[in-house]
Image (tube, rainbow, N blue to C red):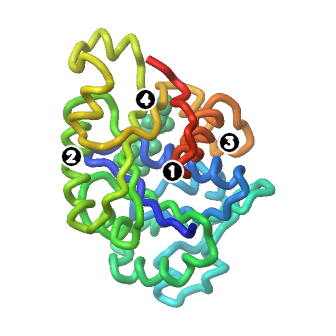
Amino acid sequence: MNQVIVIASGKGGTGKTTVCAGLSIALAKQNNRVLVIDSDSGMRGVDIMLGITDDLVYDISDIISGGCTMDQAIYKPDGEYELYCVAAPNNPDDEVSPSLLKEFIEKVKADFDYILIDSPAGTGSGFEAAAVAADRAIVVVNTEPTSIRGAQNIKNRLLDLKITDIRLVINRFDKDRFIQTDIYKDLDEIIDESGIRLIALIPEDIKITTLSQRGAMIHNWSKSGIIFSAMAQRLKGHNVPLVVKV
Ligand SMILES: Nc1ncnc2c1ncn2[C@@H]1O[C@H](COP(=O)(O)OP(=O)(O)OP(=O)(O)O)[C@@H](O)[C@H]1O
Ligand SMILES: [Mg+2]
């Protein structure tokens, strides 16, 4: 197995980090050994959502520069799961180059069933670093044309990097808002316009914000858990229906 998956979006704030954290917990709860790497230098967030911020001393740039050992910078969130996380540097100047991140991933890849990489929005160097070692990609969108255009751009860039296994997450879906804004006639139109196959439809849900921003998702695995568990199953190719039907 040993898959490296980049989580990306053209537009900022679509929910990449939330999806990355939720999916990593779901995969770990399904008995996979999972490493999350934050590639959003200067704007890291996975550590908050996985509840490891208070322990954080070292990040990926320390491993690369030899400022710490690999074990010192690989943090384990609470729980009995094989879930681990490497933070991005807090200082954007310490961003790790794509080739060095790729080298790191190649070193640790055999130790994990899944490596999820949370990338910054857009197709800049942080995305490049996250994508260059990936086998697969998940593109996160909201139901707006600016977001879908971003997904098209990301898809093209991923294809340039020879990543062809790309799946779409429509996040923060609010049925009433979707109908009232009357931009798309249905979700198929969004999927067609993005040109990416859907893997999950995640509703707008304040519990997702509350739990993730408190680093409590791993402990309160209720509604969001069902959604991310199904997504993890679909990622593995299992025929699990989309949780939220519209
Ligand atoms: N399904 C959801 N329901 C409600 N709120 C959500 C949902 N998904 C994400 N959010 C909220 O949306 C905001 C942006 O989420 P997140 O930080 O995961 O996005 P991002 O794509 O990683 O942003 P950035 O581009 O800045 O890295 C956060 O406040 C988060 O809690
Ligand atoms: Mg983010």
- Upstream in the sequence, badge 3 or badge 1? 1
Q: Callout 3 environment at 10 Å: few (<14), some (14 to 19), or many (20+)?
A: some
State the separation of the CA atoms marked 3 and 2.
33 Å
The Cα–Cα distance between marks 2 and 1, rounded to whole angstroms, is 20 Å
Asked if disc 1 is less than 8 Å from ligand 1, the answer is: yes
Mark 2 lies on residue: 152
Q: Residue at x 32, y 48 (%)?
A: 9
Residue beneath the point at 57% across and 56% down: 47
| Residue 20 marker | 1
Residue furthest out toward the right? 80
- Nearest the viewer among 134 and 213 is 134
Q: Position of residue 71 (x, y in %)?
A: 66, 80
Whether residue 178 sits left or right of residue 1 in the image: it is left
Secondary structure beneath label 4: strand
Task: Name the one closer to the observer, 77 or 102.
Answer: 102
How far is disc 1 from disc 4 in space, using C-alphas? 14 Å
Q: Which marked residue is nearer to the observer: mark 3 or mark 4? A: 4
Q: Amino acid at mark 3?
A: Ala
Instruction: Tell me residue 7's x, y (percent).
Output: 41, 54
Looking at the image, residue 187 sits to the left or right of residue 57; the answer is: left
Amino acid type at image mark 1: Cys
Q: Secondary structure at mark 2?
A: helix
Tell whether circle 4 marks a residue whose Cβ is less than 8 angstroms from ligand 1. Answer: yes
The mark nearer the N terminus, 4 or 2, is 2
For disc 4, the marked residue is 172
What amino acid type should be assigned to the residue bearing mark 2? Gln
3D distance between C-alphas at marks 3 and 4: 19 Å
Neighbor class of circle 4 (other Cα within 10 Å; few <14, some 14-19, many 20+) is some
Which is in the foreground here, disc 4 or disc 2?
2
- Residue of label 3: 216
| Mark 3 or mark 2, whichever is nearer to me | 2
